Amino acid sequence: MNPEQRKIWSDGHKTLTGLLKRPEEHENAVALFLRLHASLYASNGEHPEQPTYEDELLKDIREQTLRSYPVHTPGSKNSIVWHLWHSARIEDITMNILAAGSGQVLHEAHFADKLQTVHIHSGNGMTDEEISGFSSSVHIESLFEYRKAVASRTRSILPSLSSEQLRAKLSPARIRRISEEGAVKDTEQWLIDYWGNKNIAGLVLMPATRHNFIHLNKAMRVKLKLQK
């Protein structure tokens, strides 16, 4: 995405915010969500004439660029692989545990083993040493596969939810599952509290769309700095 396309995406996200508040616009809200969401994740060559944000990020990128840590850019020093993993983990946790009450993609498809990482939490609260270790050792192709699987699951969840379900408060049992499954580090209780104060529509807006967009922006700044 160039700056103009990012502005168009942000404007679309503002429109989505309004549509989700209006039950009569439910079908339009779901359709817009699917378009906005698809434009963030890799297209896997399905639409070469319309590259997505992740397509642009990964185009001609070097492995060293993906793994480099720390990289001092505005708002972050984290590696690109960390940004891609963290945003997918957050979406996996919130959409599957909180929105759908289903199992996480990470566990159901044994992605922790495939990613070659011991970290099964959201990535919040990691130390410099942990981020450095993750960045240098994560299996990159499996990371791309994980993101694809998480995105596909999310796109199956949203159309299955009614407007009433989107506006409903989150189940306390689902909120408890986050801690029970180690999806957030013990030091990051604030994140569970933050999600717990939202309804499902709120999770659709942040993190399922906006959070991904933010971390792709950060990742792109890393790429531009390292591959001028």
Image (cartoon, grey):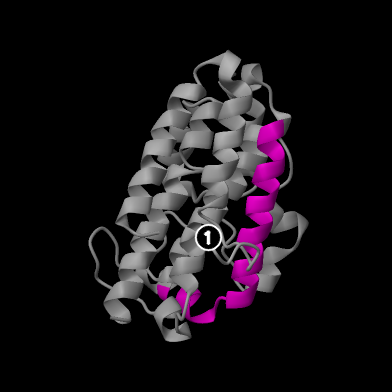
Q: Residue at x 30, y 55 (%)?
A: 3
Q: Is residue 108 above or below residue 199?
A: below
Task: Give the residue at mark 1.
Answer: 50
Tell which of 83 and 124 is nearer to you.
Answer: 83
Looking at the rendering, which quadrant does residue 126 occupy?
Answer: bottom left
Tell which of 136 and 119 is nearer to you.
Answer: 136
Asked whether residue 43 is in view, the answer is yes
Query: In the rendering, at what x and y percent does residue 142 appear?
Result: 65, 72
Dominant secondary structure, magenta: helix
Q: Is residue 92 above or below residue 195?
A: below
Looking at the rendering, which quadrant does residue 97 occupy?
Answer: top right
**Tag 1: amino acid:** Gln
Tell me where the magenta segment starts and ends, as one range.
Answer: 132-159
Asked whether residue 122 is in view, the answer is no
Query: In the rendering, at what x and y percent does residue 102 appear?
Result: 74, 40
Q: Is residue 36 magenta?
A: no
Tell which of 77 and 60 is nearer to you.
Answer: 60
Q: Residue at x 46, y 38 (%)?
A: 206
Quarter that holds the C terminus: bottom left
Q: Is residue 138 magenta?
A: yes
SS under mark 1: loop
Quarter that holds the N terminus: bottom left
Q: For the view shown, which residue lies furthest in the right direction?
A: 108
Q: For the view shown, which residue lies furthest in the front direction?
A: 49
- Say left or right for 1 vs 29: left
